[in-house]
């Protein structure tokens, strides 16, 4: 698995590529997301993930709950059909905000910038 983090204002984009399979990949993903605690929104780009284990699904659920507890918008962006199928099969598909087009991300970015302006 390859991870890359970009920041656009208060929005953090965590890009994942490849296989997210061994447990240590799940923990690397967790660490990448949790290190974005100052962001008002985190987008997890899963558009290039072609396989992941059940451990990763449970980690995603934990990250979603962490985000809710910390008032951070947490979105999955453009998950592959494999990721969607895995979320469906495990019964967790409805746990997540899923954005499948870039306009939804721009809307999220706009909200993140708007909230940071009012927080200042």
Image (cartoon, rainbow, N blue to C red):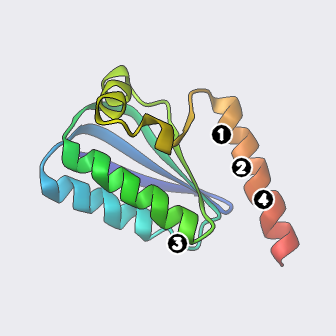
Query: On the image, numbered disc 3 is attached to which residue?
Result: 37
In x, y percent, where is residue 78? Answer: 49, 30
Residue most extreme to the bottom: 120
Query: On the image, numbered disc 1 is attached to which residue?
Result: 105
Q: Residue at x 78, y 59 (%)?
A: 113
In x, y percent, where is residue 115? Answer: 80, 64
Q: What SS does tag 4 mark?
A: helix
Which mark, residue 113?
4
Q: Earlier in the sequence, mark 2 or mark 3?
A: 3
Query: On the image, numbered disc 2 is attached to which residue?
Result: 109
Q: Nearer the viewer, residue 24 or 84?
A: 84
Q: CA distance from mark 4 to mark 3?
A: 16 Å
Q: Earlier in the sequence, mark 4 or mark 3?
A: 3
Q: Quadrant of the N terminus?
A: top left
Q: What SS does tag 1 mark?
A: helix
Up-down: is 40 above or below 84?
below
Q: Nearer the viewer, residue 71 or 14?
A: 71
Residue most extreme to the top: 81
Q: In which image quadrant can residue 120 be found?
A: bottom right
Q: CA distance from mark 2 to mark 4?
A: 6 Å
Q: Residue at x 58, y 73 (%)?
A: 38
Does residue 85 appear in this view?
Answer: yes
Up-down: is 13 above or below 107?
below
Q: Earlier in the sequence, mark 1 or mark 3?
A: 3
Residue most extreme to the front: 91
Asked if labels 2 and 1 touch by Cβ distance under 8 angstroms, the answer is yes
Q: Is residue 39 left or right of residue 1?
A: right
Asked if labels 4 and 2 touch by Cβ distance under 8 angstroms, the answer is yes
Label 3 crowd (10 A; few <14 / some 14-19 / many >=20): some
Q: Nearer the viewer, residue 117 or 69?
A: 69
């Amino acid at each position: 698995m390859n991870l890359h983090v970009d920041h656009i204002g208060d929005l953090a984009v965590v890009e994942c590529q490849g296989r997210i399979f061994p447990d240590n990949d799940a923990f690397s993903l967790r660490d990448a997301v949790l290190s974005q605690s100052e962001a008002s929104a985190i987008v997890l780009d899963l558009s290039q993930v072609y396989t992941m284990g059940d451990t990763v699904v449970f980690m995603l659920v934990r990250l979603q709950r962490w985000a809710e507890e910390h008032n951070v918008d947490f979105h999955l962006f453009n998950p592959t059909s494999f990721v969607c199928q895995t979320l469906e099969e495990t019964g967790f598909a409805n746990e997540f905000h899923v954005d499948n087009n870039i306009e939804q991300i721009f809307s999220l970015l706009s909200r993140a910038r708007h909230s940071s302006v009012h927080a200042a």
